[in-house]
Image (tube, rainbow, N blue to C red):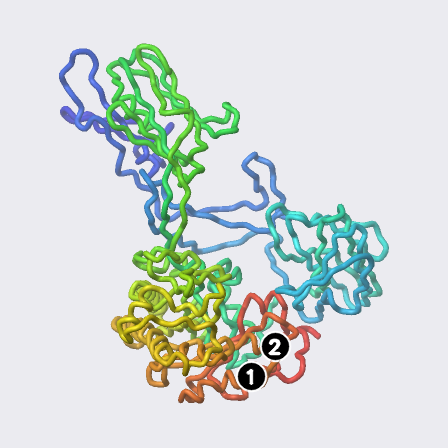
C-alpha cells in the first residue's frame, strides 16, 4: 500500500506485494479492497467518507496465454499425462458481483492460436480403412450378448454383462494398419480385455463415473498378414461391456473433399452436442467438406436459446451483531464452513481491534474483508450488524455454517444461528420479457455459424418451433396450449407447447426479430422458419385436442357465442365442428402474419418458410386446423414438408405424397423443400431423398447432422438407388 497526503485528504494506492505504482500488476483485483477510517479518544474529527472501496484499478484487455501440455498438473500438483486426457474445456466466468446475481453479458475473443511441439498432428481414417459393424457376420460372439438400436455406428450396438463373453474377428491385412475398437465409456462399465494374435490380454478400463460416451480405443498396430483380435468382458457380473464396431485404419492427416451434391444438406440442431458443443465454424466446415451444398436448415432449439428467470428461489443468509465496547488488540473472527465438513476446512476471517474501532466500524471491516474476493458468500453492514449472504441460490446455502468469536465478554459477536437460513429452491422459467430474448451464447454461436456458411457459399435458414423447455405452464403466464382438462401440453422433448395468445406472440415476435438481426449481423439476408407452428397433434392426457387455453376459449366464445367444443382427436370429422375448423387455423395464421410483419418492419428483406408435417396432420381435423389460410406462395418463400412416421413405416408412397403436398397448395417447385428423418438405417430414407430430388424440390434436408455422424452413413449419397460404397472401399 502507498499513500499520498493532499491537505486534509489521504490518497491510498494498492500496489500489491513488493510492487510500486509503476510495476504493479494488481489491476482490477485492487478494486475489491476497501478502507475505513475512525477517530480514537475524544477527538471530534471524522473521515469523509467513513469507508470506501478502491476504484480505478484496470487490467489489460488482451492477454497472451501459454499452456504447457507436457507439464500439466491437477489441483494437488499431481502430473497429468496427456495420454489420459479425453476432453478439455477452457472455461471463463463473469466477474464477481457485489450483491445478488444480476444477469450480465461478457465475451472472450481468442485469436492467433499457435500449436508447437511434437505430437501435434491429428490423424483420421483414410483411404483403405474399413469398419466392421457389431452386426456383421465376420465377428463371432461367444457367451451372452444383446443387441440394441439407436444412434450408434451402423444404427446398433452389442452389449454383455456376463464375464468372459467375447467377440472375435479374424483379419487379413495387405498393408500395415492400426486397429481400433468402438466402445462405450459408462458409469456402469467393466474392464475390457483385448487379445491380439493369441498374445497376452491387455486390459482397458471402460468405467467413467457419471458419464456415458462413445469412443474409439486404440488396440495396436498390425503388420501385413493374417491376424485375430478377441475382445472380452473382464469385469464383474452385471457390469456392462458395449461393442459398437472394430475399425481397421490406414491413418492419414489429409482430409478428403467429397463431391458436391447441390440439393442435399444436413440439418443442425442447437439442442444437440453436434451443434452446441462444437465450434460453429467446424460445423459449417463439416457440411461443406462432406459435399452438402443445399440450403442449410438450423433449428435454434427448444431447450437453451432463451434467458432464464428464477421463480420461488431465495438466498440463504445469516447475521452477526457486534455488541459492547471493543478492546484494543482484541481478536475478532468469523468462521464459515459446511455442514458435515470438519472444522479444519472452515474459512476464517479475522480482525484485530484497533484504537478507535467501534462495533459499527468492525462490522464494516468484516464486510470489506469478506467481499475481497470471496466466491461463496458476500456481505453488507448496517450499523453494528453484518449480514452475510450465500452466493449459491436455493437451499444449498442453508448448509453454510457460521461461528463468531468472541461470543461473550464486554465486546462480543452474536451470530443469528449456527447455519445460514432462508434459502429456498424454486423453478427456472423462460424469461418472457428479456431483451433480447435470445441469450448471448445462442446469438454468438448462430452468428458465427451463418457467417461461416456464407464463407463457403452456402445459404441457410434458422428455425424455431412452439416449444420451450422452461416455458411457464401456469394459467397466469398464459402461454401454454391446454387440453380440455386444463392441463398444459408438456412434451417429451422436454418442453412446453406454447399457444397463439398475445402473450405468446409478444415473446415469439422478439425471438424471430432477434434471429433476423443475428443473421443480418452475419451479413446474410435473413431466412426464418416457422417450424411446426401448429396446434399439438395428439390428446396425450386423454381429454381431447389442446386448444383450451383461456385466450383461445375467450376469443371463440366472443366470436361464436358458445364455448369451444371438445374434439376427441385429430381424426374427427371437421364437418361436426365447423366453427372450430374455421377459427383455429385462423389463429395460427394470425400468429405467423404478426411475427412476419414485426420482423419485416426492421428487416423488410427477411424471408419466411413453414415446416409442415403431413403425417401427424393426416387426420381430417388436424389437416384442417393446422394449415393456415394465410400460407400461400405469395406470403411465404417456401413450404418445407416432413413425414418421419411415413419414413419409419417404410411407406414411400406416402412419403411421395408428403413432398407433393405443397403443389396442391399452389407452391411451385422453387418454393418447395422436403425434410427427412434419418435416425433408422433400416428405413428407406435414402430412397425418399432420391424421390425428393427427382421431384425437383428446392432442397432436401436430412435430419440431422448428429445422427448422420453417429450412425456413420456412407458418402456420397447415391440418389436413393442402391447402396453407396463405404469410404475407402
Tell me the CA gap for discs 2 and 1: 10 Å
Q: Is residue 380 above or below residue 184?
A: above
SS of the residue under disc 1: helix
Depth check: give the residue in front, 562 or 288. Answer: 562
Q: Give how far across and how far down residue 666 sits, in percent.
A: 40, 89
Q: Quadrant of residue 357?
A: top left
Q: Which mark is residue 143?
A: none
Q: Residue at label 1? A: 654
* Placement of the C terminus among the 4 image quadrants: bottom right
Circles 2 and 1: CB atoms closer than 8 Å? yes
Q: Give how far across and how far down residue 241 sits, in percent.
A: 72, 54
Report the residue at 33% width, 27% height from top.
319
Report the residue at 52% width, 25% height from top.
342
Depth check: give the residue in front, 383 or 50. Answer: 383
Q: Judge whether residue 293 can be spotted in this image.
A: no
Q: Quadrant of residue 72?
A: top right
Give the crowd class for mark 2: few <14, some 14-19, many >=20 residues within 10 Å: few
Q: Residue at label 2? A: 649
Q: Give how far across and how far down residue 41 sits, in percent.
A: 19, 11
Q: Is residue 12 above or below residue 472?
A: above
User: Would residue 202 be found to the left or right of residue 7 on screen?
Assistant: right
Q: Is residue 142 above or below residue 326?
A: below
Q: Give how far across and how far down residue 412 sits, in percent.
A: 33, 15
Amino acid at each position: 500500500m502507498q499513500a499520498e497526503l493532499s491537505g486534509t485528504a489521504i490518497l491510498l494506492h494498492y500496489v500489491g506485494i513488493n510492487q510500486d505504482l509503476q510495476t504493479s500488476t494488481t489491476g482490477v483485483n485492487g478494486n475489491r479492497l476497501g478502507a475505513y477510517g475512525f477517530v480514537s479518544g475524544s477527538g471530534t474529527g471524522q473521515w469523509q467518507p467513513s469507508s470506501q472501496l478502491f476504484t480505478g484499478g484496470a487490467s489489460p484487455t488482451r492477454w497472451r496465454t501459454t499452456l504447457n501440455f507436457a507439464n500439466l498438473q491437477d489441483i494437488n500438483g499431481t502430473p497429468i499425462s496427456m495420454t489420459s486426457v479425453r476432453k478439455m474445456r477452457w472455461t471463463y466466468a463473469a466477474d464477481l458481483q457485489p450483491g445478488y446475481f444480476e444477469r450480465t453479458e461478457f465475451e472472450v475473443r481468442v485469436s492467433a492460436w499457435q500449436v508447437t511441439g511434437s505430437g501435434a498432428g491429428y490423424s483420421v481414417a483414410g483411404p483403405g480403412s474399413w469398419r466392421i459393424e457389431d452386426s456383421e457376420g465376420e465377428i463371432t460372439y461367444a457367451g451372452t450378448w444383446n443387441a440394441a438400436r439407436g444412434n450408434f455406428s451402423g444404427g446398433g450396438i452389442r452389449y454383455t454383462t456376463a464375464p468372459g463373453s467375447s467377440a472375435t474377428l479374424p483379419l487379413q491385412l495387405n498393408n500395415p494398419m492400426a486397429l481400433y475398437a468402438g466402445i462405450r465409456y459408462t458409469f456402469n462399465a467393466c474392464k475390457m480385455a483385448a487379445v491380439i494374435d493369441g498374445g497376452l490380454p491387455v486390459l482397458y478400463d471402460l468405467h467413467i463415473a457419471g458419464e456415458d460416451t462413445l469412443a474409439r480405443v486404440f488396440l495396436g498396430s498390425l503388420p501385413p498378414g493374417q491376424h485375430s483380435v478377441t475382445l472380452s468382458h473382464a469385469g464383474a457380473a452385471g457390469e456392462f461391456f458395449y461393442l459398437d464396431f472394430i475399425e481397421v485404419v490406414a491413418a492419414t492427416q489429409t482430409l478428403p473433399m467429397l463431391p458436391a451434391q447441390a440439393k442435399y444438406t444436413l440439418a443442425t440442431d442447437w439442442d444437440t452436442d453436434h451443434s452446441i458443443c462444437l465450434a460453429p465454424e467446424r460445423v459449417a466446415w463439416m457440411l461443406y467438406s462432406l459435399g452438402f451444398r443445399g440450403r442449410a436448415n438450423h433449428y435454434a432449439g427448444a431447450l437453451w436459446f432463451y434467458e432464464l428467470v428464477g421463480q420461488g428461489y431465495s438466498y440463504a443468509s445469516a447475521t452477526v451483531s457486534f455488541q459492547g465496547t471493543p478492546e484494543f488488540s482484541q481478536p475478532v473472527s468469523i468462521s464459515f464452513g459446511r455442514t458435515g465438513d470438519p472444522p479444519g476446512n472452515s474459512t476464517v476471517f479475522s480482525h484485530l481491534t484497533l484504537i478507535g474501532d467501534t462495533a459499527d466500524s468492525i462490522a464494516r471491516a468484516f464486510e470489506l474483508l469478506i467481499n475481497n474476493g470471496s466466491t461463496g458468500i458476500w456481505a453488507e453492514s448496517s450499523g453494528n450488524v453484518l449480514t452475510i449472504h450465500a452466493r449459491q441460490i436455493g437451499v444449498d446455502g442453508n448448509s453454510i455454517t457460521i461461528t463468531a468469536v468472541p461470543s461473550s465478554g464486554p465486546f462480543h459477536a452474536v451470530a443469528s444461528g449456527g447455519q445460514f437460513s432462508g434459502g429456498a429452491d424454486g423453478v427456472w422459467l423462460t424469461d418472457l420479457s428479456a431483451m433480447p430474448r435470445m441469450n448471448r451464447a445462442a446469438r454468438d454461436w448462430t452468428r458465427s455459424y451463418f457467417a461461416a456458411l456464407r464463407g463457403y457459399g452456402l445459404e441457410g435458414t434458422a428455425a424455431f418451433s412452439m416449444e420451450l423447455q422452461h416455458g411457464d405452464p401456469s394459467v397466469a403466464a398464459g402461454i401454454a396450449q391446454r387440453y380440455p382438462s386444463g392441463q398444459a401440453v408438456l412434451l417429451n422433448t422436454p418442453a412446453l407447447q406454447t399457444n397463439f395468445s398475445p402473450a405468446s406472440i409478444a415473446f415469439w415476435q422478439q425471438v424471430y426479430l432477434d434471429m433476423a438481426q443475428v443473421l443480418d449481423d452475419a451479413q446474410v439476408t435473413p431466412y426464418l422458419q416457422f417450424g411446426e407452428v401448429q396446434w399439438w397433434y395428439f390428446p396425450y392426457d386423454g381429454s381431447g385436442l389442446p386448444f383450451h387455453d383461456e385466450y383461445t376459449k375467450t376469443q371463440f366464445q366472443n366470436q361464436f357465442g358458445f364455448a369451444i367444443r371438445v374434439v376427441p382427436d385429430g381424426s374427427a370429422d371437421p364437418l361436426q365442428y365447423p366453427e372450430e375448423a374455421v377459427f383455429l387455423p385462423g389463429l395460427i395464421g394470425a400468429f405467423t402474419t404478426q411475427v412476419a410483419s414485426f420482423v419485416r418492419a426492421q428487416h423488410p428483406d427477411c424471408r419466411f418458410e413453414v415446416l409442415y408435417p403431413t403425417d401427424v396432420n393426416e387426420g381430417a381435423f388436424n389437416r384442417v386446423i393446422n394449415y393456415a389460410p394465410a400460407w400461400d406462395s405469395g406470403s411465404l418463400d417456401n413450404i418445407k414438408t416432413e413425414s418421419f412416421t411415413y419414413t419409419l413405416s417404410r411407406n414411400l408412397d406416402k412419403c411421395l405424397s408428403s413432398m407433393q403436398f405443397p403443389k396442391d397448395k399452389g407452391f411451385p417447385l422453387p418454393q418447395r423443400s422436403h425434410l427427412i428423418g434419418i435416425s433408422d438405417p433400416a428405413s428407406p430414407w435414402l430412397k425418399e431423398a432420391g424421390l425428393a430430388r427427382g421431384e425437383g424440390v428446392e432442397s432436401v434436408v436430412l435430419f440431422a447432422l448428429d445422427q448422420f455422424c453417429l450412425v456413420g452413413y456412407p458418402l456420397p449419397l447415391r440418389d436413393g438407388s442402391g447402396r453407396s460404397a463405404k469410404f475407402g472401399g
